[in-house]
Amino acid sequence: MNPILRETGIITFWTFFTSVIIGAAGSLALRWPLTATYLMSVLTIGPVLAILRGRDRAKDPLDIGERAGVELLSLAILIGIGWVAGQYLGK
């Protein structure tokens, strides 16, 4: 598999998974707005995860430019998912 697609899938999956959990927990427990909480989680967890996955430059299959592109693509996908979900959930 292409390393760029692999990293995009990994970062997108884990960022989505943790952001949904944080958004749902904040919405249920603290009455935070679901969409806003999800989007703030995406914008903080995604870049941190990309940095943590690329911190060992000797073992990283991607160069710095490719890693940045993967993160931008992942953020675009996740923000699109959040926007669509916000339209249908209305929260």
Image: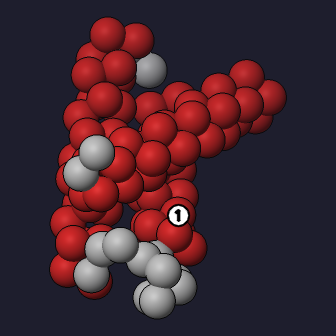
Q: List the single residue furthest toward the right.
A: 29
Q: Is residue 47 left or right of residue 67?
A: right
The chosen color scheme is: secondary structure
Type of amino acid under label 1 = Leu
Query: Vertically, is 62 above or below 57?
Result: above
Residue at 21%, 72% in the rendered image: 66
Q: List the single residue furthest toward the bottom.
A: 58
- Residue 33 in the image: state x and y as whole percent: 54, 32
Query: Closest to the observer: 87 or 12?
Result: 12
Q: Is residue 21 left or right of residue 48?
A: right
List the residue tagged with mark 1: 49
Q: Secondary structure at mark 1?
A: helix
Please tell me in which quadrant of the rendered image residue 21 appears.
Answer: top right
Labels in figure, total: 1
> Which corner quadrant holds the N terminus?
top left
- Residue 31 in the image: state x and y as whole percent: 69, 29
Residue at 73%, 31% in the rendered image: 25
> Which corner quadrant holds the C terminus?
top left
Q: Is residue 22 visible?
A: yes
Query: Vertically, is 77 above or below 61?
Result: above
- Residue 45 in the image: state x and y as whole percent: 53, 58
Residue at 35%, 23% in the rendered image: 86
Query: Closest to the observer: 89 or 57?
Result: 57
- Residue 56 in the image: state x and y as whole percent: 53, 85
